[in-house]
């Protein structure tokens, strides 16, 4: 019974230490990349509410930009920032000093979540909602 308790305590301590070491590694990587967290950009860049289900079905990016011409420049800037971060992350993955660290694979996994088939997800995300739904 005592052995089971000791093993359980050792496992808990091991998990806590690994989590702490990963947090330190993550902070170093964030500092190098110039970001504060993995949530670099919001998942949705703009949101539009339409009045009917038919309008919801017919609404698309082109219609959005026709109705909100001022948002086109903002969208351009968002895509430029996302492209810059994409290049920064690609360069980091290809060449960095953290590869030899024990928990580095988790860093690459987190970066990999921001890529779709090897390309940083730079598409402008548009949320369209029906206000009656």
Image: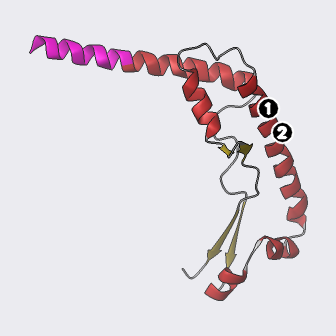
Seen in the image, is 30 located left or right of residue 103? right
- Mark 1: secondary structure: helix
Does residue 133 show up magenta in the picture?
no
Q: Main secondary structure of the magenta part?
A: helix
* 10 inside magenta stretch: yes
Q: Quadrant of the C terminus?
A: bottom right
Residue at the image point whose x is 72% and y is 49% from the top? 121
Residue 88's mark? 1
Image position, residue 1 (x, y; %): 8, 15
Drawn side of residue 7 relative to residue 67, left or right: left
Mark number for residue 68?
A: none
Outermost residue, left side = 1
Residue on which the image places disc 2: 84
Residue 56 percent location from the top left of the image: 66, 80
Nearest the eye: 102 or 59: 102
Q: Secondary structure at mark 2?
A: helix
User: Is residue 83 at all visible to an observer of this figure?
Assistant: yes
Above or below — where is 54 with respect to 125?
below
Pointers 2 and 1 in contact (C-beta within 8 Å): yes
Which residue is more in the foreground, 36 or 4?
4
Q: Please report the residue visible at 53 percent of the width from the left and 15 percent of the height from the top.
A: 102
Q: Position of 73 compared to 42: left or right? A: right
Extent of the magenta region: 1-14
Q: Quadrant of residue 98?
A: top right
Q: Is residue 11 above or below residue 126?
A: above
């Amino acid at each position: 019974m005592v052995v089971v308790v000791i093993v359980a305590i050792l496992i808990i301590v091991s998990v806590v230490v690994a989590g702490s070491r990963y947090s330190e590694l993550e902070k170093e990587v964030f500092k190098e990349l110039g970001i504060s967290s993995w949530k670099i950009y919001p998942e949705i860049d703009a949101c539009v509410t339409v009045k009917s289900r038919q309008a919801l079905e017919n609404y698309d990016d082109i219609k959005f930009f026709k109705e909100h011409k001022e948002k086109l420049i903002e969208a351009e800037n968002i895509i430029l920032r996302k492209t810059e971060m994409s290049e920064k992350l690609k360069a980091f993955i290809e060449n960095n000093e953290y590869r030899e660290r024990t928990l580095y694979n988790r860093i690459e996994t987190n970066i990999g979540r921001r890529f779709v088939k090897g390309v940083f997800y730079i598409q402008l995300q548009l949320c369209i909602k029906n206000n009656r739904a």
